[in-house]
Amino acid sequence: MLVERYEKIFMNISGLFLLAAVVALVISVTGNHASLPEPAGRLDPDDVRTTAPFDEPGVVQTGDDEYRVVYVAQAWRWEPAEVTVPAGAEITFTVTSTDVIHGFFIPETQANAMVIPGQVTEFTITFDEPGVHSLICHEYCGIGHQDMGGRITVEAASGD
Ligand code: CUA
């Protein structure tokens, strides 16, 4: 097949752009400790309140520098409404809903997931710096949607 010289050059440039985009994507995901939210199980929304770990929402230390934060979403609040976690630790969020679809979003972080009744959603992030973050529901869930907020306080790790 005969390919014009200029056509060949443009094809190569296009290929390089594609390659650069893939490299940028890999770096942005691996460099930010990002993990895609993944389904971590199923349960009947009616059983959320009586099924571990959702019968006791809150923060649990699971290892050196590893914590699990269990949340229950229910129109129109997060349970717990406020949590405190250390900076620099691996924080795994385990979230489900008792009623409708909610959205779990902590602005300026990698935390962005759907919270679906019947599904357990899990993802892990690290807060690098101490500070206070808002937890926002970013999926319209009814008349009280805009009031569905929470607070996550990130404390300096002990020893800092
Ligand atoms: Cu919950 Cu919007």
Image: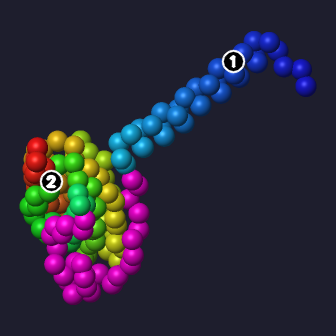
Q: Counting other residues with Cα less than 10 Å from the Cα at mark 2, is it few (<14), some (14-19), or many (20 or more)?
A: many
Res. 152 image quadrant: bottom left
Residue named by callout 1: 10
Screen quadrant of the N terminus: top right
Quadrant for the C terminus in the image: top left
Q: Residue at x 34, y 59 (%)?
A: 123
Instruction: Name the residue carrying label 2.
Output: 86
Q: Residue at x 48, y 33 (%)?
A: 24
| Residue in view at x 25 percent, y 82 percent | 52
The magenta stretch spans residue 44: yes
Q: Position of residue 153 (x, y in %)?
A: 10, 52
Residue 46 position in % (x across, y down): 26, 86
- Which stretch did the figure color magenta? 35-63
Q: Position of residue 159 (x, y in %)?
A: 10, 48
In the picture shown, does residue 65 fall above or below 10? below
Report the Cα–Cα distance between label 2 and label 1: 50 Å
Image coordinates for residue 150, horizontal then vertical, percent: 12, 58
Q: Horizontal placement of 18 versus 99: left or right? A: right
Question: For residue 135: magenta?
Answer: no
Can you tell which quarter of the image residue 3 is in? top right
Quarter of the image where one finds residue 115: bottom left
Which residue lies most toward the front here? 159
